[in-house]
Image (cartoon, grey):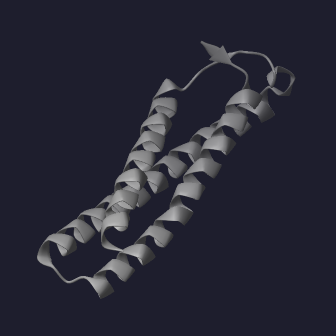
Amino acid sequence: MKDSISHQHVLCQDWARELEFYKTEIPIFKKRLEEIVTRNTATDILTQVEHFENRFRIMRLHCDELLHDLKLKNDTLMGQAAAKPNYISVKMIENDHNIAELMEFTANDFQQTKQEFYRFLSKYL
């Protein structure tokens, strides 16, 4: 399916904002983990804390990689827009299903991790 350059540009901007939001949430989650560590020193709890620390680290790296890919895609789109200004709104380029699928996966992973984390917090805070 084909899309216009302007539509693809808007999608890239939306996805970048979504990823930036996820990145701003992660430090908040880490602070909550610190609260748990100060109140609980049991081995099983510390194991779960480490699990979430690792998940958050991986999520941040994944967000950074996707942001980089989106920047490259957006730079390409801007180059195409500059080269063909009359075709900015014409559906002439293929959708990037790979990035769309990665964004969907990232959103689902973030929501599942957040729900799992909140269940963990409700038990130990």
Count of all numbered marks drawn on residues in the image: 0
- Whether 51 is drawn above or below 92: the answer is below
The quarter of the picture where the N terminus appears is: top right
Of residues 117 and 89, the one nearer the viewer is 117
Of residues 115 and 62, the one nearer the viewer is 115
- Whether 36 is drawn above or below 74: the answer is below
Residue closest to the far left: 43
Of residues 26 and 120, the one nearer the viewer is 120
Q: Position of residue 57 (x, y in %)?
A: 35, 64
Q: Position of residue 59 (x, y in %)?
A: 39, 55
Residue beneath the point at 29% across and 82% down: 37
Confirm whether residue 75 shows in the render: no
Of residues 42 and 15, the one nearer the viewer is 42
Residue beneath the point at 34% across and 53% down: 116
The quarter of the picture where the C terminus appears is: bottom left
Residue closest to the far right: 86
Q: Position of residue 11 (x, y in %)?
A: 66, 35
Residue closest to the far bottom: 38
On the rendered structure, is 108 left or right of 120? right
The quarter of the displayed image where residue 118 is located: bottom left
Residue beneath the point at 48% across and 35% down: 104
Residue beneath the point at 45% across and 47% down: 111
On the rendered structure, is 92 left or right of 63? right
Residue closest to the far top: 1
Confirm whether residue 67 shows in the render: yes
Q: Position of residue 38 (x, y in %)?
A: 31, 87
